[in-house]
Image (cartoon, rainbow, N blue to C red):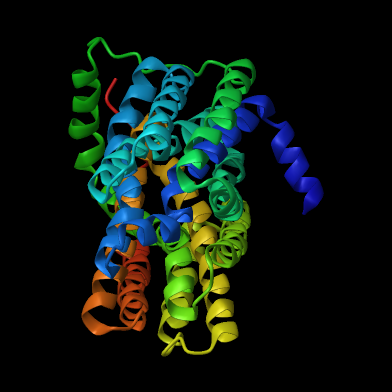
Amino acid sequence: MVKDVFHSLRSGHWPTLLGAWLHFEISFMVWLLIGAMGIAISEEFALSSSQKGLLVGTPLLGGALLRIIVGPLGDRLGAKVVGLGILGLEGIGLLLGWLGGTSFESMLGIGLFLGFAGASFAIALPLASQAYPSAHQGLAMGVAGIGNSGVLLAAFMAPRLAETLGWHQVFGIMLLPVMGTAFIFFWLVQSAPVTNETDSSTIDSIRVLLRKGLQDPVMYWLCFLYGVTFGGFVGLSSYLPIFFHDQFQMDMVQAGTLTAFCALTGSGARPLGGLLADRFGGLTLLQGIFLIITALCLVSGNLDHFVLTYIIILLMMFCLGFGNGAIFQVVFNRFESIMGTASGFIGAAGGLGGFLLPSGFGWLNEITGTFSSGFFALALVSGLAGISVMIGQRSIWLGKPKFVPDS
């Protein structure tokens, strides 16, 4: 297995893959920064349960919206150029968090701006895809997708720095790795080919998406599936510090450490999901993954026992990360010719799912007085996704040709 992995990595341009991973890693850390410090920010502004969910979910919403734009831009202008622009905009967002953020409303605005970091997804995965042959797409995009572990850095480091220096200062400190990443990304990454469209404007590139990609119903289906897996992963990663604090009275550092281990489990599972999807097919794997997630959510019970609850969440994060890798093997097989656009659109659905999860958990907790209602809602959605894969593999996917845009 290990030998096969190294052989697969040598089959493409590994420096580009490394640069794509680093871009995603650091950007993901910035994207989840507010969630990692959500306890400190919530206590300073005395937020309610629903406000806490909205606070940590807002950067995810910003990332969802921007991924739709960044995907076509990457196809049109080149992923390397757009990737450098994203890092620059992340720096501006961090600067605003460092020098501003004096109210709940201003933090919502800063969170939306930090959504640019979430758009890194629509750059990193197409770069990885373009750097490797079709036989190794699942592994390549899975490796780039390990950048999800940026939440590990955010959850582990940010609370400790915030406790010592204050949460405002953490935004300023994060400017350093973002600037370093911009230099390394520029040095490592090969310029990817751009879309050869006769129209030159960004509006025309977006029309390509609307005219071609959105005509395929599989695009919407994959958006739904990724909204569950990636939305579940990133939404829980952002919300777990607040959950551990409110449910089990953990302090900010303890909650961040527990979240970091959960994020590591989910991130590490992503390349495994991509690798096995290359061998057995992503849809085949997803049938079981969604049903396991459903079962884990249902057996979470009343969440009174910490050890049992934590084990369930660890397993849940593993399955969500595994599913992320498997889904993008399917995405490549269907939308190879417009991978940047497809990644942006489907990735946006994942970001939207990430926003809905903490917002929904916070709202349901405020209404019902328990976090169990949020896990039960996630079980319902995951169960529907699993059923759709079993039905869709037979009636929607099989027998249909791979998507190829008009020349």
The correct choice, above or below, for 44 with respect to 405 in the image is below
Q: How many marks?
A: 0
- Please say whether residue 296 is visible from this viewpoint: yes
In the picture, which quadrant includes the C terminus? top left
Residue ID at (49%, 80%): 248
Asked if residue 282 lies left or right of residue 139, the reply is left
Residue ID at (61%, 28%): 19
Residue ID at (31%, 67%): 388
Asked if residue 128 lies left or right of residue 366, the reply is right
Give the camera-side residue of 25 and 278: 25
**Residue 342 in the image: x percent, y percent?**
35, 38
Give the camera-side residue of 26 and 208: 26
**Residue 347 in the image: x percent, y percent?**
37, 44
Asked if residue 216 lies left or right of residue 166, the reply is left
The correct choice, above or below, for 169 with respect to 288 in the image is above
Query: What is the quadrant of residue 85 in the picture?
Result: top left
Q: Residue furthest right?
A: 3
**Residue 47 in the image: x percent, y percent?**
29, 63
- Please say whether residue 138 is visible from this viewpoint: no
Query: What is the quadrant of residue 86 in the picture?
Result: top left
Asked if residue 33 lies left or right of residue 264, the reply is left
**Residue 310 in the image: x percent, y percent?**
56, 77
The correct choice, above or below, for 284 with respect to 99 in the image is below
Give the camera-side residue of 98 and 179: 98
Residue ID at (38%, 62%): 43
In the picture, which quadrant includes the N terminus? bottom right
Give the camera-side residue of 400 and 182: 182
